[in-house]
């Protein structure tokens, strides 16, 4: 809680591209929360260093992601928008929290196991420690809610556990955060393998929609989407491809899946694919147009992220001072 408002914190790592999955599972919910909360949204550029990045490309991509945040409608008048690396308190609190987190807890994390298998040549400490940095991100701002996709549920549990552990050892210090999942769209699946989440690090670009894909590309990707051979447009566990398309259509148009399903009685997959594609194209069109304007306005982007980092840092330092005092560090 800050003042009389609850605090919302979330972030996206600048890897690959922002996908429709990131948008529907996370950013779209952030947009809906902007008026009622203190909103803090970061580009998690320290987190993404757990895998090797090409420095020049990485810098460019991080700026592109920041411009996409603004293009989506995140408003610097209502939300604090910044790069994680610009607020040194994230790394500092992560160190302290490391001392209150167990190696066994970290090595059991699904994402750690998945990424260790994917990057067997580079299983670094950062990969293991990823959830602790995430806990620091969230706890620094005394966040009440963390709007994320369902894939982040396990990491959020760790943030809660660490907060509770610290509060019990000392005295109440951190707000214990709650996850915030949207009504639907909490997990969007790959268009090519609908049993896997739509992932921004998918090597097959047909598996995901990039937020700034042009309309023709979006239409083509949906036409190629994997379905099944049964032909009926219904939401069902044994029809992951069709169910995924229905979920996307419902989330993009702000309707329920059951409602959307009714439109397809007597219709086939071609109609479903065309309708999803059209709805997504229309939802993303203004974002892409605004992005094209913003990405060339470097001065504006810099002014927004500098101001964002200053505001974030002021809040973060209050928590860090409290933590340093409680663990017994000598005051500066
Ligand atoms: N498919 C998805 N459906 C719903 N929500 C999703 N999110 C991600 N994918 C989906 C949510 O987006 C936010 C940012 O996630 P992230 O930065 O951890 O990136 P990612 O897209 O989850 O990353 P990948 O695809 O695993 O690639 P890497 O990690 O290799 O860069 C989170 O709130 C997440 O829940």
Image (tube, rainbow, N blue to C red):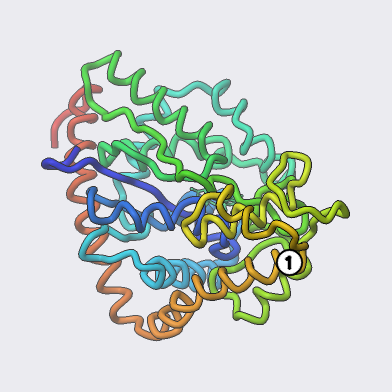
At horizontal 40% and vertical 52% (from top left) the residue drawn is: 29
Say few, some or many: other residues with alpha carbon within 10 Å of mark 1 (under 14 / 14 to 19 / 20 or more).
some
Can residue 121 be seen by looking at this rendering? no
Label 1 secondary element: helix
Q: Is residue 63 above or below residue 317?
A: below
Left or right of 46? Residue 167 is: left
Q: Camera-side residue: 110 or 322?
A: 110
Can residue 291 be seen by looking at this rendering? yes
Task: In the displayed orientation, state which residue is furthest to the left.
Answer: 3
Q: Is residue 118 above or below residue 231?
A: above
From the top left corner, tell me how far across and down residue 128 is, in percent.
57, 35
From the top left corner, tell me how far across and down residue 10 is, in percent.
39, 48
At horizontal 41% and vertical 31% (from top left) the residue drawn is: 159
Residue highlighted by disc 1: 206
How many numbered marks, from 0 up?
1
Task: In the displayed orientation, state which residue is furthest to the right.
Answer: 229
């Amino acid at each position: 809680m800050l003042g009389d408002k609850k605090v919302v914190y979330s972030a996206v790592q600048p890897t690959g591209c922002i996908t429709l999955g990131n948008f529907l599972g996370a950013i779209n919910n952030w947009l809906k929360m902007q008026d009622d909360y203190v909103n803090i949204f970061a580009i998690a550029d320290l987190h993404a260093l757990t895998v090797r990045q090409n420095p020049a490309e990485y810098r460019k991509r991080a700026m592109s992601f920041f411009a996409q945040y603004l293009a989506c409608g995140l408003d610097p008048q209502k939300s604090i928008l910044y790069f994680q690396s610009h607020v040194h308190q994230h790394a500092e609190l992560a160190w302290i929290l490391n001392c209150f987190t167990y190696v066994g807890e970290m090595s059991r994390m699904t994402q750690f196991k998945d990424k260790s298998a994917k990057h067997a040549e580079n299983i670094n400490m950062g990969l293991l420690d990823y959830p602790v940095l995430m806990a620091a991100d969230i706890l620094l701002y005394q966040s009440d809610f963390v709007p994320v996709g369902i894939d982040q549920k396990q990491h959020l549990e760790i943030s809660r556990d660490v907060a509770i552990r610290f509060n019990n050892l000392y005295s109440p210090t951190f707000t214990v955060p709650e996850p915030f999942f949207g009504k639907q769209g909490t997990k969007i699946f790959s268009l090519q393998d609908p049993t896997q989440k739509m992932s921004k690090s998918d090597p097959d670009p047909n598996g995901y929609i990039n937020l700034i894909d042009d309309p023709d590309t979006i239409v083509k990707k949906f036409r190629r989407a994997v379905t099944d051979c049964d032909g009926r447009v219904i939401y069902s566990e044994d029809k992951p491809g069709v169910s995924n398309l229905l979920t996307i259509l419902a989330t993009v148009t702000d309707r329920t899946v059951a409602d959307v399903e009714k439109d397809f009685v007597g219709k086939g997959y071609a109609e479903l694919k065309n309708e999803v594609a059209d709805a997504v194209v229309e939802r993303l069109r203004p974002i892409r147009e605004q992005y094209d304007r913003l990405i060339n306005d470097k001065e504006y982007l810099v002014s927004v992220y500098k101001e964002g980092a200053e505001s974030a840092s002021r809040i973060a330092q209050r928590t860090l001072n409290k933590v340093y005092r409680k663990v017994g560090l000598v005051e500066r």
